[in-house]
Image (spheres, grey):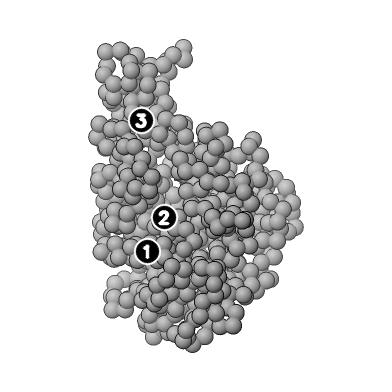
């Protein structure tokens, strides 16, 4: 290889949602001791790195994405010493570890916001609409004078979780002050003003705090946010399906300067620390701009996750992403599941009697898109597709993310009583959006305790469905055809076969074979003395002939190949 080994270019990273992964103290909520207990499982699975969703002190009004103290661990998860122990254990096991950071907003319990609230503002009718109040502690947030003498929000921005993105400050008697603070997410998550140098310096300090403790990289929450358009203009009306639609708080040019500053901090370290950005930016050429040499190392390709079950659309996403990222000399970052979207098994499952699969917007962050979650879906087909999709993803050049429980083929859980649901997206929309709790249900590890060995008792912060008993890790462990063993086998091969590994300058990363509407067919050419591997996936309804090949490397299920043909909803790796 012409450059020093850069692990993040080809790593498979396992996302741990700490509340849901494993519970060490038996209180029904996952924690760091629970994660440490499962390090051998993760090692055996074969992933290269872990990413933990936020572990910080938080009132947990958005499951920890509302941070009150960026330099400590929330007591429900454990202590800073536990976290340091986890870093050590992970490194000891030969894996890397990344954490999350939430820079777009703080919690309303953060000392800065408490200080800002204590700073009283006057309801002065002579102040023009949209005037900015940036005195004292309010300079760290966006506080604007409302319209119509302060009685209406400053503009038409809508919160991602429903309702206006502005809340009015009230005086001691509870009367409106005419001043409104910005929260693109829940009202408990006020947006920070990133033009403020104190905010920037503070966050550089947060990065160093965790890098100094041995964290190898950081996932950046809302990496396409932070910068707001000057003058706070209204959002333009949405034209359905218009890829150029841009709200004035997403993908603004100003955000890149912040990432350049952060990159300089990561580069101070030896070995250099890395970033993966949560970049919800549609056009591949726009999202690749975040991966310029002096910005972020990697950024999630969410178009891959939201593509419907159709080879043609999936292939378009892959080719666009590889083409644009290549311009930046950046690897692609593939993802099929995370804590914000429906589990792939359910997403890819057609509604019974129709052929509708749900796009990822379903129940995820975009509450403006309503998706049918009540009609029964064919989960058997969904499970086949989820297996096929995983195998294909792991054959692609670049880095891949696996969300905890994806390797068990867990489905989305809809049967959760309203009073147990936690997601503000559910509560703020009065249940119109089903929210994201369904992909956050505690993992089934075994069959001994009532919580399926999430802990040793029956306490669970969200209820598990009964059929998960059959999906428990210990059950799948002894079934050679289980999704767990498919994942392990794929990851093992990925390490053993150079064709599936890092890109070598003189070898093309991928060579496309046939290009139909419902067949994905590509070769990862031979490199570093290994053999070439071909991956074929069938998203159609008819079996597909596999033409000339030298045998099967790995198939997505035991019924993937029948009479030499690849069956619908299956994928295969072949020697060529
Ligand atoms: C994206 C995170 O993935 C999501 O879980 C969270 O609710 C929002 N950002 C707000 O921080």
Q: How far, Cα to Cα, is label 2 from label 3?
A: 26 Å
| Residue 300, image quadrant | bottom left
Q: Residues within 10 Å of mark 2 (few under 14, many from 20)?
A: many
**Distance from label 1 to label 2 (Cα)?**
13 Å
First reached walking from the N terminus: tag 1 or tag 2: 2
Crowding around mark 1 (Cα neighbors within 10 Å: few <14, some 14 to 19, many 20+) is: some
Q: Earlier in the sequence, mark 3 or mark 1?
A: 3
Of badges 1 and 2, the one in the foreground is 1
Q: Which residue is mark 3?
A: 156
Tell me if I can see residue 262 in this picture. Answer: yes
- The percent position of residue 478, horizontal first and vertical second, equals 68, 71
Q: Please count the marks in the image.
A: 3
Which quadrant is the C terminus positioned in?
Answer: bottom left
Say whether marks 3 and 1 touch (CB < 8 Å): no
Identified at 63% across, 37% down, the residue is 418
Of mark 2 and mark 3, the one earlier in the sequence is 3
Question: In the visual, does 187 lie left or right of 352?
Answer: left
Q: Which residue is mark 2?
A: 302
Which picture quadrant has residue 172?
A: top left
- Residue 255 position within the rendered picture, expressed as x and y whole percent measured from the top left: 28, 45
Q: Nearer the viewer, residue 343 or 32?
A: 343
| Picture disc at residue 316 | 1
Element under disc 2: helix
Kind of element beneath mark 1:
helix
Separation of marks 3 and 1 at Cα, in angstroms:
34 Å
The residue at 66%/39% (across/down) is 417
The one of 444 and 536 positioned closer to us in this rendering: 536
Q: Is residue 7 visible?
A: no
Front position among marks 3 and 1: 1
């Amino acid at each position: 290889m012409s450059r020093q080994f850069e692990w993040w270019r080809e790593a498979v990273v396992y996302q741990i949602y700490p509340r849901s992964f494993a519970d060490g103290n038996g209180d029904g909520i996952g924690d760091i001791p629970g994660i440490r207990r499962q390090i051998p499982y993760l090692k055996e699975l074969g992933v290269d790195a872990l990413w933990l969703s936020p572990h910080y002190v938080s009132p947990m009004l958005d499951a920890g994405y509302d941070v009150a103290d960026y330099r400590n661990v929330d007591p429900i998860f454990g202590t800073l010493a536990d976290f340091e122990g986890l870093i050590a254990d992970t490194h000891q096991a030969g894996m890397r570890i990344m954490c999350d950071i939430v820079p777009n907003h703080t919690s309303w319990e953060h000392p800065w916001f408490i200080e800002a609230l204590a700073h009283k503002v006057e309801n002065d009718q002579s102040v023009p609409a949209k005037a900015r109040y940036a005195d004292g502690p309010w300079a760290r947030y966006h506080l604007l004078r409302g319209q119509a003498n302060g009685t209406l929000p400053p503009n038409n921005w809508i919160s991602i979780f429903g309702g206006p993105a502005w809340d009015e400050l009230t005086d001691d008697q509870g009367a409106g002050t005419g001043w409104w603070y910005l929260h693109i997410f829940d009202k408990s998550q006020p947006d920070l003003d990133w033009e403020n140098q104190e905010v920037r310096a503070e966050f550089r300090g947060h990065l160093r705090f965790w890098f100094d403790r041995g964290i190898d990289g950081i996932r950046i929450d809302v990496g396409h946010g932070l910068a707001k358009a000057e003058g706070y203009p209204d959002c333009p009306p949405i034209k359905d399906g218009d890829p150029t639609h841009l709200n004035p708080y997403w993908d603004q040019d100003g955000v890149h300067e912040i990432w350049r500053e952060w990159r300089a901090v990561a580069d101070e370290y030896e070995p250099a620390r890395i970033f993966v950005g949560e970049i919800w930016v549609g056009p591949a050429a726009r999202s690749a701009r975040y991966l310029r040499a002096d910005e972020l190392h990697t950024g999630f390709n969410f178009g891959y996750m939201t593509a419907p079950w159709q080879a043609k659309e999936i292939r378009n996403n892959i080719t666009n992403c590889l083409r644009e990222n290549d311009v930046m000399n950046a690897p692609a970052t593939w993802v099929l599941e995370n804590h914000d979207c429906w589990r792939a098994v359910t997403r890819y499952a057609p509604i019974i009697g129709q052929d509708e699969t749900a796009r990822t917007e379903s129940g995820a962050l975009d509450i403006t898109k309503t998706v049918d979650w009540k009609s029964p879906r064919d989960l058997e087909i969904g499970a086949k597709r989820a297996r096929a999709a995983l195998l294909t993803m792991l054959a692609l050049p670049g880095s891949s993310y696996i969300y905890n429980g994806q390797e068990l083929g867990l489905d989305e859980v809809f049967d959760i009583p309203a009073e147990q649901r936690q997601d503000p997206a559910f509560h703020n929309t009065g249940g119109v959006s089903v929210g994201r709790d369904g992909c956050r249900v505690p993992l089934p590890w075994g069959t001994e305790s009532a919580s399926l060995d999430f802990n040793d008792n029956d306490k669970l912060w969200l209820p598990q469905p009964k059929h998960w008993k059959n999906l428990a890790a210990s059950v799948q462990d002894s079934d050679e055809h289980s999704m767990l063993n498919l994942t392990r086998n794929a990851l093992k091969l990925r390490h053993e076969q150079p064709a599936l590994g890092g890109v070598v300058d003189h070898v093309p990363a991928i060579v496309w074979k046939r290009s139909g509407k419902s067949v994905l067919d590509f070769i990862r050419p031979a490199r570093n003395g290994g053999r070439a591997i071909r991956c074929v996936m069938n998203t159609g309804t008819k079996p597909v002939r596999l033409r000339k090949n030298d045998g099967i490397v790995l198939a997505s299920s035991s019924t993937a190949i029948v009479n030499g043909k690849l069956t619908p909803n299956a994928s295969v790796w072949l020697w060529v």
